[in-house]
Image (cartoon, rainbow, N blue to C red):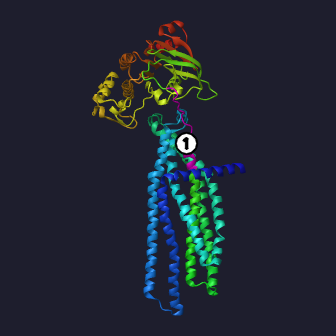
Amino acid sequence: MKEKKKHDLKGAFKVVIRLIKDMKGISGWLITAIVISLLSVCLAMVAPSLLGNLTDRVYNLINQSIPIDRLAFGREIALLILVYAVSAIASLLTELIMNYSVTRHFTCRIRTEMSGKISKIPIKTVDSTPNGEIISRMTHDVSIMGSSVHSIFGVVINGVIRLAVILVVIFFENPMLAMAVVVFVPVSIILSGVLASRSEKHFNESRTASGKIYSLCEENLTGFDTVKAFNLEESQNKRYHEIIEDYSEKAKKGYVVSGMVQPIVTLVNNLAYIVICVLGGYLAISGKGVSAGDLVAFVMYTKLFSAPLESIASGMSMLQSTIASARRVYGFLDGEEMQENEQEKPNKDILGEVVFDDVYFSYTPDKPLIDGLSLKIRAGQKVAIVGPTGGGKTTLVNLLMRFYDPQKGRILVDGKDISKMHRESVREFFGMVLQDTVLFSGTVFDNIAYGRPTAGKEEVIRAAEKAHVDLFINSLADGYETVINEDSTNISGGQKQLLTIARAYLADRPILILDEATSNVDTRTELILQQTMDELMKDRTAFVIAHRLSTIENADIILVVDNGKIVERGTHAELIKAKGLYAKIHASQYSNASV
């Protein structure tokens, strides 16, 4: 237990150091704020002394009938008002500078880094991490980190420095009274540290629960139609309330523990007030060198002394929440990245020969999927991949596109190992249409142009015509300038697929991957598209993943994949004649079709 606690403290210290290092980008603003804040501290030290002098003048007038120099008295009052006014302005400027620098430079930069990190993390990380969890870290956790900069700044400047300055002043004023104040400092610091450290565990747990909330919200919005169709609103609301209650319970424990810090420190400071008032009053009455003005000034200094202690306590309390968020943010930023290798330079003109050389792959070590696959596809061949669900068809595509890399073996394109090329270079070989259509917020034109952003309007229209999507585009009120909303709900599923096919036409890549590309269109449109795609696939290597065997009967070679292995290969006629797995799948489809 002690070892674990020591490890946690060491980890927390590293997080704080890294957080401070991340402030380098706003160091200029911080230095400016420090200078202005120091001015405010110095002025705050002058005010009690001026107030003490004014008190002595009034006291001497009342008790000793010593007349007041009205001109000097007025100047001191004006000076006191000026001191308080300038101190207030300095504090306001400090806050404005901190808000500007933190919002514009600190939190913005971290979110930019996280956005850049998303493009570098492996596909397996995205597949295994709920989207809401990543969103939670980019929004909620980064916001808390930004707030912590204020907290750390307050602890260092308004806390430690002000505390040091006040200690020097009060010891100079009266060492005996100063010792009575200082004796309470260790008590405040120890209590703050103990309570703050205990709250971190609860904040860590609450941040994890917060990620689950974001994930569930994202899931409900993405699957809104499904939730409605199956009347799952009550069930999903119940899940949401359970997670909210879990988050609330854990956050409440953290805030209750951390919230105890400042009241306890305030209580200790009030005890110091009592001691100062009793001891100072005794010294003043006894005539031991303490005047009424000195006592007023010292009480004011004691009040100023308590403020930084409370600032430090508040900062330590908030720091635990910050550390919990920073761990999650830095954990994401320090996560595994895709390793790039550019030992091999891709050919400028790709022919499209693809070779799988003794490839082994599994998503998890205990479940092998691709086991010693060897295969050679000549340039320009149309290759169909069929087989049972979960047999490894889509995995072959994932390996080709370098979404994943094989654990053993090589994949060659035109004789060059793609694992030794930059992923972007590899993906420039492939045009791709997936069964799950992905459209982006923007116009119809923009979504087709994603295939080749440099394409002109005529090229985009030509691609749409080849995909037989131009008819429905022209029937829209704004034609190619029709805006597709965020969820693409203003066009049908089949129309979405047609747009992604047009995008692939426009990309005009040497190797095509079609993963159930015609699954969301009607039979008549499928026949038209099949003819058009046959024309597109001429002189190009094409991989077609299909469940409808009628769409791949003219393939040059059909690969039947089961449990990660190619169990059959040949033409449609050869495989039907062999009466193996392919023939069974074919027979079952046509049997179902005839029912």
Q: Residue furthest top?
A: 577
Is residue 58 placed above or below 578 in the rendered structure? Answer: below
Q: Where is residue 25 in the image (x, y as percent from the top left)?
A: 49, 52
Q: Position of residue 79 (x, y in %)?
A: 45, 78
Q: Position of residue 76 (x, y in %)?
A: 46, 81
Which span of residues is magenta-colored?
324-344
Residue 239 forms part of the magenta stretch: no
Tell whether 163 sits left or right of 219.
right
Front residue of 150 and 502: 150
Residue, x 60% and y 84% (percent of image)? 290
Tell whether 223 sits left or right of 184.
left
Q: Splitting the image into 4 quarters, where does residue 335 fall? A: top right
Front residue of 490 and 93: 93
Q: Mark 1 = which residue?
A: 332
Residue 335 forms part of the magenta stretch: yes
Q: Residue furthest bottom?
A: 65
Front residue of 240 and 235: 240
- Amino acid type shown at disc 1: Phe
Is residue 480 placed above or below 39 in the rendered structure? Answer: above
Is residue 63 placed above or below 496 in the rendered structure? Answer: below
Q: Can residue 249 be seen in this view?
A: no
Q: Can residue 70 be seen in this view?
A: yes
Q: Is mark 1 on a helix, strand or loop?
A: helix
Tag 1: Cα neighbours inside 10 Å, few (<14), some, or many (≥20)?
some
Front residue of 22 and 237: 22
Q: Splitting the image into 4 quarters, where does residue 509 fall? A: top left
Q: Say how many tags the image has.
A: 1
Q: Position of residue 582 (x, y in %)?
A: 52, 13
